[in-house]
Amino acid sequence: MSNEYKDWLLDTAQEYVLENEYMRSIEYITVWEDGYLALGTSIYGDKVIYFIWLDDLDGWCCNLIEVH
């Protein structure tokens, strides 16, 4: 994969969780397995961790891993 495509995937994953109001802000995001782990603040002010991935059939998806 080209670096431009990797950057686009990362940017798009961040936009997905922010625009769909899963998270209010992202403090840290990293590549993990076939997706990304994003640590940040939920729209309710809780600290959250989401796993975000690009599914071949459904497009961008995310799963809440933990809430603090």
Image (cartoon, grey):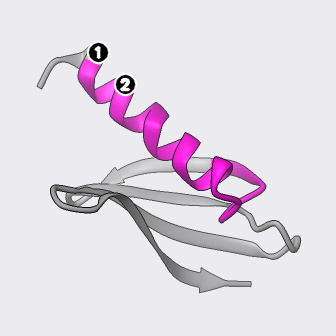
Amino acid type at mark 1:
Glu
Which residue carries the number 2 mark?
Answer: 7
| 68 with respect to 53 (left or right) | right
Which of the 4 image quadrants contains residue 60?
bottom left
Q: Which residue is mark 1?
A: 4
Residue drawn where x is 87% and y is 74% of the image: 44
Quarter of the image that includes the N terminus? top left
Name the element at disc 1: helix
Q: Residue at x 15, y 56 (%)?
A: 56
Counting from the top left corner in percent of width and height, residue 34 is at: 20, 57
Image: 21 above or below 30: below
Residue plotted at (53% across, 79% down): 64
Asked whether residue 61 is drawn in magenta, I would say: no
Q: What predominant SS class does the magenta segment belong to?
A: helix
Image quadrant holding the C terminus, namely bottom right
Q: Residue at x 60, y 49 (%)?
A: 28
What x and y, as percent, mark residue 2? 16, 18
**Highlighted range, magenta:** 5-27
* Location of residue 20 in the rendering, given as x and y in whole percent from the top left corner: 63, 57
Q: Quadrant of residue 21?
A: bottom right
What kind of element bears circle 2? helix
Which of these two is toward me, 27 or 44? 44
Q: Is residue 23 magenta?
A: yes
Looking at the image, which residue sits at the far front?
57
User: Given contact means CB atoms under 8 Å apart, are the residues at marks 2 and 1 in contact?
Assistant: yes
